[in-house]
Amino acid sequence: YTHIYTHRQSVAQSEVQEQSRRWYSVSHLSVQERIDRKRNAALIGGGQKRIDAQHKRFAGDSVVTGQGRINGRLVYVFSQDFTVFGGSLSGAHAQKICKIMDQAMMVGAPVIGLNDSGGARIQEGVESLAGYADIFLRNVMASGVVPQISLIMGPCAGGAVYSPALTDFTFMVKDTSYLFITGPDVVKSVTNEDVTQEELGGAKTHTAVSGVAHRAFENDIDALLNLRNFFNFLPLSNQDPAPVTECHDPSDRLVPGLDTIVPFETTKAYDMLDIIQGIADEREFFEIMPNYAKNIVVGFARMNGRTVGIVGNQPKVASGCLDINSSVKGARFVRFCDAFNIPILTFVDVPGFLPGTSQEYGGIIRHGAKLLFAFAEATVPKITIITRKAYGGAYDVMSSKHLRGDVNYAWPSAEVAVMGAKGAVQIIFRGKSNQAEQEAEYVEKFANPFPAAVRGFVDDIIVPSTTRKRICRDLEVLASKKQTNPWKKHANIPL
Amino acid sequence: VNMNLSNTECIFFVASRLITRLLHCLWQVMKTCKKMGIKTVAVHSDVDASAVHVKMADEAVCVGPAPTNKSYLNMDAIMDAIRKTGSQAVHPGYGFLSENKEFAKRLAAEDVVFIGPDTHAIHAMGDKIESKLLAKAANVNVIPGFDGVVEVSYTVNMVVLATTFCKEGFRLSSQEAASSFGDDRLLIEKFVDNPRHIEIQVLADKHGNALWLNERECSIQRRNQKVVEEAPSTFLDPETRRAMGEQAVQLAKAVQYSSAGTVEFLVDSNKNFYFLEMNTRLQVEHPITECITGLDLVQQMIRVAKGFPLLHKQEDIPINGWAIESRVYAEDPYKSFGLPSIGRLSQYQEPIHLPKVRVDSGIQEGSDISIYYDPMISKLVTYGATRAEALQRMEAALDNYVIRGVTHNIPLLREIITHPRFISGDITTNFLPEEYPEGFKGHQLTSEGRRELVATAAALYVSAQLRSQRFLGNLRVSTTPQEQRQWELCVELEKGSHTVAVSRSGSTFTVEVDGVTVEVSGEWNLASALLPVTINRTPRVLQCLSRDAGGDITLQYLGTQFKVRVLSQLVSTLSAHMPEKVPEDTSSILRSPMPGSVVAVSVKPGDVVAEGQEICVIEAMKMQNSLIAAKAAKVKSVHCKAGETVGEGDLLVQLE
């Protein structure tokens, strides 16, 4: 009986392989295939039968690979098959993945991995480990050459987790996918911690706490459909420009709501997403890591059809200050955009870096430097809009003119200064009684965009409602921007 | 019109956002002032600094922080501001100080013209009990049995109509009254059956002349607040109209009224009418009277305030055509016909491109609707030669009204104006609870409506799919594009699923919904908030509120928002294999139904509550809401305390 079943499985496998050449095209075959596999997994069950099965060989091993097109654009895909040896990684499995990755590098097309694997195939021993390393090497070589996306659709444990970690984006499926180095059982035996799979490495943990995953989706189908949508934002390789799609939203559209969005009280919060959605084409913003380090907002949008990466401080969370997590989140995103020719829009409302022992001990200096590094080395078009506060070192960091910002705008509400009025007056006029008066004078002199504008650090003070119009126009101009950094083997970003 | 007001004249506006929001009128007043060459000054609280009326005024003065008793009700600050700006006249706005006799007195003492009736009239009419005694003396019909003393034997019609919870209701009402108007007395009066609320607009000058400017029917109400108004009323015959008008004028003359005012009546099914109260100000619904009479009430008020006699005679006042007003509120109509909602207006477009549509609003795109004020967004007025024409325009206006970022009551408004009973004119003040005893549930789709909606959603989905395959100037897209001609889709709507086949020729989609062919054509502009389409040759305006990668589309169709999910046939079959998500058990948790502040928490952890027992009271926009336990249980935890501000959906109390 088992024999018949496994035979059918192998036949089905080769069929799937045939189809998989086109399976990521418009027809959603991938979904079909994945579901079938899930069902099969349920049929086979675990335990003894699985161990039995592990001594058999399967045509195609535990991974399906191929290439296809999403909305007409080429993509290479591999999908691990949990129904075969628990999706464990064998030498053959690894070779198949390496093969398409090599091809993807040669033709310049993104690689999407659908991960669903229990880990190394223990029976194969070191061969399996070698397979991992082969994939890791290719992940590293492809990094910055073609976009790599991982979608975790089931368990992904042990060494297998490092492949997604090396790719540009890791997405997860809520409730059914897990990422961890060691599972709950091992954790229990080593550190005596009681923790469930979901708590240890579920989608919620990785999108909100660890920052390992960039986004989570409701279920397999939702994840695949969103991935297709996300793919439309990305260029095919570092040799291709950011894609431009047909756009129905007028590029000169005024956004009247922006004129009133920044509150008069400098301490009052507003939602940076309102600004971003206001200026973006059709209010569409694909946010990356929406639940992690929420004091910075990063993600993709389109301006007049052209993909842009947007970075914005979020005044709604921790006043939008920069801390360790937000710096790292921002830096990685900026580097991705720079690697793949995606222009960067930066919305600045930052009161500074977050003070405190936990931040200092955690190395905010080192981590903050990453964001500074990323903005400074980026050679793609960089447009910066200071909406309100741009204080101190954080002003420098947030794509300032000094870090080769191409166009730097300030809204009338902008305050470009070394620090806020209160702090500054306390330092300069320590112990003096007329602090309120001095504060007012400080606000008058420094808490506005003029000092920066007269020195050319800000190109123009603009009416907020015209922001979209100006950005679209500037992006058109900057589309042919050419800038190179001096030759080097690679830079030494403060990791 | 002979206007002898010099250009240096300055009118001071005591207008909060309440008014501004209800700005409707205020905005109109300012416009009229500008037209008349009068300088304007607006006062505002901290949070209203960027409100439309403040920007529109020539000068603005801040009178305090957001709570109204520290700003708009703060007479000292306002008097100061009046002196500072040298204003010669004050427009009191609506609500707040507009009917405060103390304020009018102080103005008179400083020789500042109060635009509105004089202190005596406000005094007489401001008190509901006293005004009834006066009306009775002036031979105006008052509710039988009323003589100023509460007779408990009557069925009482209280602000909160709940005899069994009378005490509770009384407490809530008087607290509400105290919180907003600083007066905690309640009026108890006889219950009139099947009542209609019909009011007469009067206009009187300082020389003893008074006119009645016909009636407005305001029977469509919820919780004693008007929702839809019209002028004239379908119910009144010329005799009744004249009788009501004459009594209204008698009353105005009896109190030496000198401004625009409104005399409200309850009318029963036999056309007996009873005086209810007199509003000594320009009311929200005044534009419909302007529409049918052709008079600019604001201008008349300013003239009268300056001491000019009326220009018109009673026989000059016509009824030309029909006008309807819908009050567009930022509130959720699915919760007791409207609980306040807050948010930022991310998109806002008024349907003023349509003919004979007037929108008076105090907000703009980007405005914040906060918990502090009345939630009115605008008043939408349409006018037509006949009632049918005005109603048709109202339908179109509501369909073309784009409001995003806050929940609004357009679904309810559109259902009311297309309701057969409303169209026939057979309405009472109980219309809403009578027609929707289970609460308002939105538009109920007919099978044809369903098909139209499904077809439009499918066509929209296909146009979006097609567009996502079009890249500009990209050389690496496959050179042999195969554009699909036929789509097999599955559309889910309200738990029903439809098999749909779509084919396209140009911008026209032929959609087969469960075997019936529907033809949908349109521009398919995916960036526009409005989605004008022609469905089977009938033009319709839908709105696309959201569209995401997972196939979920939210469309506004016939006023109501519907969530539609469009999936390819294959994805739909596979969806069946997706694990089901378990929804949260809602009976053991109590969430805030609206944003507001917590007035009182009546339980603490460990208490045992009975089903229906009050757990806490939330107040927002002058309205208190008592939250009750859905089942008998022990209180597990309490997550709020009195005085706190809570958002919609925030966890308040957890039961075991």
Image (cartoon, coloured by chain):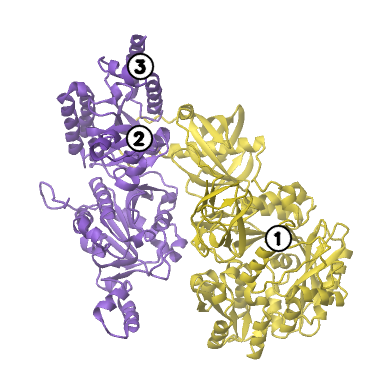
- On screen, residue A222 versus residue B151, left or right, reads left
Give SS at disc 1. loop
Give SS at disc 3. helix
- Asked if marks 1 and 2 fall on the same chain, the answer is no
Say which residue label 3 marks: A12
Say which residue label 2 marks: A177
Can you tell which chain is drawn purple?
A: A
Chain ID, mark 3: A
Q: Are there few (<14), some (14-19), or many (20+) residues within 10 Å of tag 2?
A: many
Q: Is residue B169 above or below residue B50?
A: above
- Image quadrant of residue B514? top right
Say which residue label 1 marks: B160
x and y percentages locating residue B46 in the rendered image = 49, 73
Q: Is residue A451 above or below residue B620?
A: below
Q: Which amino acid does label 2 sit on?
A: Ser
- On screen, residue B85 versus residue B226, left or right, reads left
x and y percentages locating residue B121 in the rendered image = 75, 80
What residue is at 45 percent from the left and 48 percent from the top?
A248
Q: Which amino acid does label 3 sit on?
A: Ala
- Image quadrant of residue A30? top left
